[in-house]
Image (cartoon, rainbow, N blue to C red):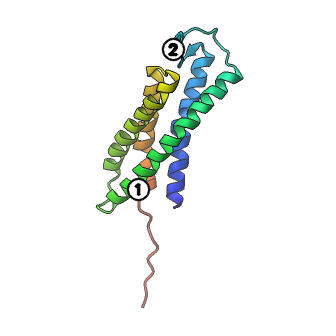
Amino acid sequence: MKQFGRHLLFGLLIILGGLFLYMTIAISIGYLPYSDRPGPGWYKKPFGISWDEIRYIWSFILFLGIYILGTLIIVYFLFRLFRLIGYNRIIYSILGGLIIGFLSLYWTYGIGWYIAIDGSTILTGGILGLIYGATLFPKFLKPTKKNITATV
């Protein structure tokens, strides 16, 4: 259960926290990563972000977080079933990276539709999911070694 909680915490921090940082930094340097009219692009003066924009990004991240959380729960228990067959860190890194990366990309694209998100933010969501799924995710699936005591 402890591994499951860590999996959810780190998954949400890396994927959603990374997206939040990407979007706020992009706006701060003058690139608008979302907008229906006039559309994403370089419109603002560099080095400025308002609290309204931060709240808007935060609301998007919270809404996206519901779907990312559900994905992380399902993927974790699916891989726990796979672990019954055996544990191989390399295979779990490849599969975890691809599955979590694709689902993060998919949900960022799907939920981003509501705010007319641009392609770079969608790719960032997918890449953050790929990084998490390939690096940290397999560590949370690793079987814990139990202390074996000899009895006579």
Q: Residue furthest bottom?
A: 152
Q: Position of residue 96 (x, y in %)?
A: 37, 45
As displayed, is residue 118 above or below residue 4?
A: above
Residue 46 point in image, percent of width and height = 63, 11
Q: Residue at x 44, y 31 (%)?
A: 110
Q: Secondary structure at mark 2?
A: loop
What amino acid type should be assigned to the residue bearing mark 2?
Pro
- Report whether 122 appears left or right of 83: right
Q: Quadrant of residue 149?
A: bottom left
Label 2: few (<14), some (14–19) or many (≥20) C-alpha neighbours in 10 Å = some
Instruction: Tell me which residue sits at (57%, 19%) in the image.
Output: 26
Q: Which mark is residue 77?
A: 1
> Looking at the image, can residue 113 be seen?
yes
Q: Quadrant of residue 81?
A: bottom left
Q: Residues within 10 Å of mark 1 (few under 14, many from 20)?
A: few
Q: Amino acid at mark 1?
A: Phe
Picture coordinates of residue 101 (x, y %)?
40, 37
Closer to us: 36 or 20: 36
Q: Secondary structure at mark 1?
A: helix
Q: Nearer the viewer, residue 123 or 69?
A: 69
Q: Is residue 35 above or below residue 45?
A: below
Q: Which residue is mark 2?
A: 40
Residue drawn at the location 41% of the way across and 58% of the way down = 142
Q: How far is disc 2 from disc 1 in space, using C-alphas?
A: 37 Å
Height in image: 93 above or below 59? Answer: below
Where does the image place residue 77, in percent across and percent down from the top left?
Answer: 41, 56
